[in-house]
Amino acid sequence: MTSDLSSKAHLPLEAALARHAEAFRERFGPGSPSLYFSPGRVNLMGAHLDYNQGPVMPTAIDRGTFLALRRRSDRRVRFASTFDPRTLELELDELPGQRLRFWADYPLGVLRELLLARGGSQDLCGVEILFGGNLPVGAGLSSSASICVGTALALDRAYELRLERLDLVRSALAAERGFVGVQCGIMDPYAVGFARAGHLLWLDCKDRSFEHLPFDFESLRLAVVDSGVRRELAEGAFNRRVEECRAAFELLRVAQPEALCLRDVQLATLEERRRSMDPTLARRAEHVIREVGRTFEARERLLAGEPDQLGALMSRTHASLRELFEVSCPELDLIVEVATGSEGALGARLTGAGFGGCAVVLLRRGAEEQLERRLHAAFRARFGRAPRVQHFGGDPGPRALEGA
Ligand code: GLA
């Protein structure tokens, strides 16, 4: 699935969804579908901490997934996408037990979860959904959580299930872990599902408690720079990091028995054990342990009104992702290097899992143009092409919208 950003990225949401309803009619015939929007997210701090039960600081962004849904009179389910000519068609009673290995696995996984929670599909009608949107796919902006939470919301409304927001988030998570097979942490569906405009989410992944931290989207901007490098998470690189962290924890917990997860392990414990550990596992653990400290500090800096310090911490996170966690790539490193040297840019790091995708830059309003100029020149000189730079605002979270 490739993304088509050029024509839709700057359309106001209502207009973009009206156009999406038109695309739905072209695909599925006349009528007025229900319309939904579900945002993507960027993570400012807490890189690779969620599955180590640490704290994370993401925010939803004003780009995401569009969904147009219509109930059917029979029991057929049809999922289509504006990014892919293929349509998935099946009967409600014959949902596959295994993933099909294309994008429709995400909504299919959610549908399965909701039916499971409901105790079956009896008395339900079929649905047809057209997916689309203005979020780059596979770019580290959590298109997968966006599509999963959006599907959960749309199906909840279509079937009048009246689920709590937390149930929608849980079904999105279960679909991605259980059906698609990515061992992702809880950050992404929480960041999407519990978004609040003008705020970052502070989520402690150990007890799943969260709160909203005010973020000044007026004077600060988030630029997201796409490296153009893509790697599917399900390919295994992400799951390998999860495994490495688990293995590091197994070794370290022996020296610190009260620790329940890698997030609890102290730097002193790692130093004591480092020589007897595989150096790769020691590097992964060091990233996690130091990132926990940086993320708590970032929270304090943000609350104290010191965005420069928050930016500096983001840049240190990137260095750690490059050196210790080894999930960066030359394109992302160049973006971060150039961005951090640009006036008014406060800090930068890769966002999402890494292995390509996007870098996020925290900058003061007014510094956008210089940043773009410098990035284009440097990137072109080194890689022969310009990276895509977009400026995102926050978002109030998944919702139904008018527009058909
Ligand atoms: C991916 C996963 C998240 C999180 C990040 C890294 O986006 O889906 O759960 O682990 O990587 O912080």
Image (cartoon, rainbow, N blue to C red):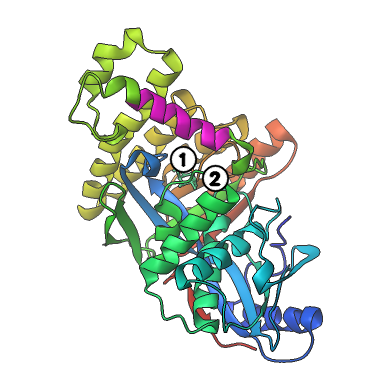
User: Which part of the image, by quadrant, shows the N terminus?
Assistant: bottom right
Q: Earlier in the sequence, mark 2 or mark 1?
A: 2
Instruction: Decide: few, some or many residues near mark 1? Use Cα within 10 Å; few <14, some 14-19, many ≥20.
Output: many
**Residue 230 picture quarter:** top right
- Using the rendered image of the protein, determine whether residue 248 is visible from the camera's viewpoint: yes
**In the image: residue 178, left or right of residue 204:** right
Residue numbers of the magenta segment: 237-249
Amino acid on which the number 1 mark rests in the picture: Arg
Residue ranking furthest to the bottom: 31
Query: What residue is shown at x 64% (from left), y 38% (from top)?
Result: 235
Magenta span: predominant SS is helix
Q: Secondary structure at mark 2?
A: loop
Q: Position of residue 378 (x, y in %)?
A: 63, 36
Asked if residue 7 is positioned above or below residue 69 in the image, the reply reads above
Q: Quadrant of residue 211?
A: bottom left
Left of 391 or right of it: where is 58?
left
Q: Is residue 161 magenta?
A: no
Which quarter shows the C terminus?
bottom right
Residue marked by disc 2: 182
Instruction: Tell me which residue sits at (46%, 38%) in the image.
Output: 340
Q: Residue at x 80, y 64 (%)?
A: 86
Tell me the residue that label 1 is attached to. Answer: 349
Residue 303, label in figure: none
Mark 2 CB near ligand 1 (8 Å cut):
yes
Most distant residue in the top direction: 275
Can you tell which of label 2 and label 1 is closer to the viewer? 2
Residue at x 54% of width, y 47% of height: 371
Distance CA(mark 2)–CA(mark 1): 23 Å
Tag 1, which secondary structure?
Answer: strand
Q: Which amino acid type is marked by label 2?
A: Val
